[in-house]
Image (cartoon, rainbow, N blue to C red):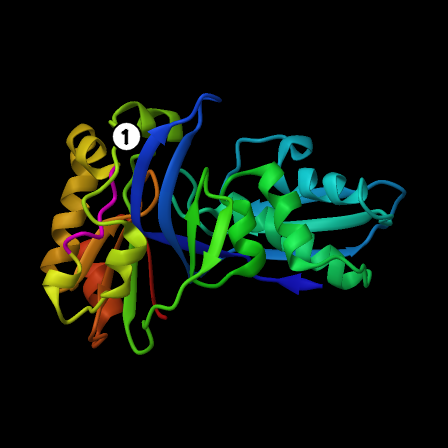
């Protein structure tokens, strides 16, 4: 079976408070986007499950990769035969795009479907949430508002059809720990679920309350990320923000004429993705 684990962006991200367990309660909207890895799972040639990774260099031994962790965690729930897993990495890491989380979630879904296991999406999402906070979202892989540590998910209606997106990955990488260290948790003036109801790309006033709380400190510490945001605005995007804890910057455009060429010209040395919702 071959599947294509896709990235996500965060449309708004509010860090609300620090929890007693050391994590933070957040509110964010996850949106799936088309920048994708390639994942193939086949019956094992040998007696053990294996993982082979190509494409982008992943500084992680196979046994610690979230894909392998997903296999072994699901095997605790249902009987699974050994498989050989081939992962080709395309989505940049250290970007706030959730590539590793997507790989893990797509592994769970693919294994369930391959071996006809009777496990609901909700059960898979609960398992995925044990692997990482973003993982649960990718089981559903549709617009969701996320609360708690990112695992309390609810579907959300947001009209994006016909809009275009460009994502650029600055060379800087921002660790999640580093990003949280620069944030002072606070509840926003307008709750994100309320702000998102009025989302209208043609109405700037409807967008002003949809903010990423990490930007205030990250963009100061990493000028190249701030510069990427300014360049994206200069390309004519109606909405521009950092995804997650960074460092990827995305822009949403109502018009996509020559967008790939324009982005390539503005960011000649950086990885980027251009697509439609």
Give the residue number, with chain letter if any, for mark 1. Answer: 185
Disc 1 element: loop
Is residue 55 at least partly visible in the picture? no
Residue appearing at x 49%, y 52% in the figure: 153
41 left or right, relative to 46 = left
Q: Residue at x 29, y 65 (%)?
A: 165
Place of residue 227 in the rendered image (x, y in percent of width and height, measured from the top left): 14, 43
Query: Which residue occupies 84% across, 47% down?
Result: 82
Q: Residue at x 51, y 52 (%)?
A: 137
Q: In the visual, does 255 lie left or right of 87?
A: left
Q: Where does the magenta region start and end?
A: 208-213
The quadrant of the image that shows the C terminus is bottom left
- In the displayed structure, 233 sits above or below 199; it is above
**Picture coordinates of residue 92, whole percent (x, y):** 42, 46
In the image, residue 223 sits, relative to residue 128, either above or below, namely: above
Q: Main secondary structure of the magenta part?
A: loop
> Residue 158 location in percent, x, y?
34, 68
Q: Nearer the viewer, residue 73 or 260?
A: 73
């Amino acid at each position: 079976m071959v599947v294509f684990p896709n990235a996500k962006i965060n449309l708004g991200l509010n860090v609300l408070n620090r929890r007693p367990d050391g994590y933070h309660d957040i509110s964010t909207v996850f949106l799936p986007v088309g920048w994708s890895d390639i994942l193939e799972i086949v019956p094992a040639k040998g007696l053990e499950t294996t993982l082979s990774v190509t494409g982008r260099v992943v500084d992680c031994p196979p046994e610690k990769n979230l894909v392998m962790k997903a296999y072994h965690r699901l095997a605790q729930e249902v009987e699974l035969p050994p498989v050989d897993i081939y992962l080709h990495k395309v989505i940049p890491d250290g970007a706030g795009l959730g590539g590793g989380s997507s790989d893990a979630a797509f592994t769970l879904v693919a294994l369930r479907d391959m071996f006809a296991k009777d496990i609901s999406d909700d059960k898979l999402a609960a398992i995925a949430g044990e692997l990482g906070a973003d993982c649960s979202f990718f089981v559903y892989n549709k617009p969701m508002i996320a609360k708690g540590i990112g695992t309390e998910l609810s579907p959300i209606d947001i009209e994006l059809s016909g809009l275009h997106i460009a994502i650029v990955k600055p060379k800087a990488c921002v660790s999640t720990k580093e990003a949280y260290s620069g944030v002072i948790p606070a509840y926003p003036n307008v709750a994100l679920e309320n702000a998102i109801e009025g989302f209208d790309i043609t109405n700037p006033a409807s967008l002003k309350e949809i903010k990423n709380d990490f930007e205030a400190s990250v963009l100061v510490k990493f000028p190249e990320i701030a510069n990427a945001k300014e360049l994206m605005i200069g390309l004519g995007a109606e909405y521009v923000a950092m995804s997650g804890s960074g460092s990827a910057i995305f822009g949403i455009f109502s018009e996509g004429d020559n967008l790939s060429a324009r982005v390539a010209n503005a960011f000649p040395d950086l990885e980027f993705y251009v697509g439609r919702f």
